Amino acid sequence: MVVSDPQAQPGPSNTPRSGAEWLARVKRATPTPIKAAIKRATGERTEAEAPAAGGGRRRYRQADAWTGDRFTFQADGRTHRCFFITGCYKSGTNWVQNILNLHPMVNCKGEFHFEALWRGYESFTAQPWFLASRPRLKEIATDSVQDIVRRMMYAKTRDKPGALWLGDRTPRKMVELLPGAPMVNIRRDGRDVMVSWNFHHLRVKSADRVWEGVRPLAERLLPEFRADPASFEKRGKGFLYDETWFRAHARIWGENVLHDLEAARRLRERGTPLLELEYARMHADVVRARADLFGLLGLNEGDAAPLSTESRTLPGFREGAVTSFYRKGTTGEWREYFDERLVRWFKEEAGEALVRAGYEASGDW
């Protein structure tokens, strides 16, 4: 006799061997309406009734149901897709996010920093003596990491439930987390990045938010900045003029740019949709950049709200306050702050990246 349901097979193997197995059998045999009545009577909430926190976490598992490709999934009866915005710190990732969020079909959030999760995954699966490096187990690890990415992006974007394009904006190197997902990478002149980074660090609330290598300097500069922020707009004052801070951050920018130039080539070879933006060119023609961004996602730009100062989607910032996160948003400002020492330090740490990215024709600038 052939029985399709293994639970229905005759003989001793079909006899429950524990109380837990008996309970599981009873649950399976109980009709759904009776289960729901029992849950209501005992105060236990069904999954649909559960709040967004706690028991409602199961709702976000819908994002595990990817279909066709790893960045597309079905949830709440609708098809959702993921995309990513990357670039070095202080290079305009917020600006790109603000523009994309003008569209009713887009909800982009930042910063997830999934690259930290990915580094752990790579370490976990890289060593040949780790079981996770075995092909089948590595595949499970990959699936699990990608499930986390989709779940978190889906969970964080429920404040705009009509959006079907869900984005992560994180200043980071361009690494593909969900194969095939559209990517935007924005690049900015590293010298302007250095100036912006300097004021960003001056605005932090406490020295422990700054790299520990320059924490003693931060403990001196932060109170001075709070007492007289305008004085830091003059050349010669701030993190920018500390050689340790400057070299470390110039090196970060250079490494990011060189990495992303090569990553862009590989992504294009694989057919990944990629839009590379440059901050100064975007500053000069933001209307074109807006069209390109919505085009990347296949969206009608006519459905989006217009660019405006209120949405922080136009070039530059109205406030212009040295203490504001949105300080200036200009181009070429580095010329007001760089002296001979800074020029030399930047050439030594990031000169190659500056030339390869097209900001200078040679190292003689």
Image (cartoon, rainbow, N blue to C red):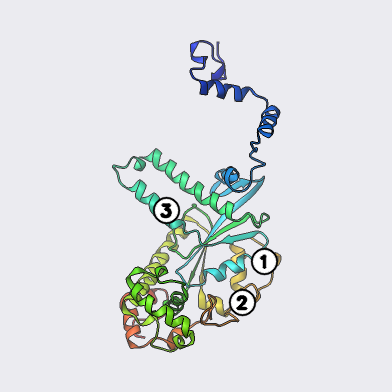
| Residue at screen point 32% across, 42% down | 130
| Residue at screen point 57% across, 45% down | 54
Q: Circle 1 sits on which residue?
A: 301
Q: Circle 2 sits on which residue?
A: 314
Q: CA distance from mark 2 to mark 1?
A: 16 Å
Type of amino acid at the residue the image marks with label 3: Trp
In this rendering, is residue 289 above or below 56?
Answer: below
| Mark 2, other Cα within 10 Å: few <14 / some 14–19 / many ≥20 | many
* Image coordinates for residue 328, horizontal then vertical, percent: 53, 81
Direction from residue 78 to residue 5 in the image, left or right: left
Type of amino acid at the residue the image marks with label 1: Glu
Question: Mark 2 vs mark 1: which is more N-terminal?
Answer: 1
Kindly indicate the quadrant of the structure image that contains residue 24: top right
* Image coordinates for residue 324, horizontal then vertical, percent: 54, 78
Kindly indicate the quadrant of the structure image that contains residue 173: bottom left
Depth check: give the residue in front, 85 or 270.
85
Q: Circle 3 sits on which residue?
A: 118
1 or 3: mark nearer the eye: 3
Task: Give the structural element (helix, strand or loop) at label 3.
Answer: helix
Type of amino acid at the residue the image marks with label 2: Leu
The reply to whether callout 2 and callout 1 are in contact (CB within 8 Å) is no
Depth check: give the residue in front, 11 or 175.
11
Residue 351 seen anywhere in this rendered image of the structure: no
Count of residue discs? 3
| Residue at screen point 52% across, 81% down | 330
Task: Give the structural element (helix, strand or loop) at label 1.
Answer: helix
**Residue with the most extreme left position:** 129
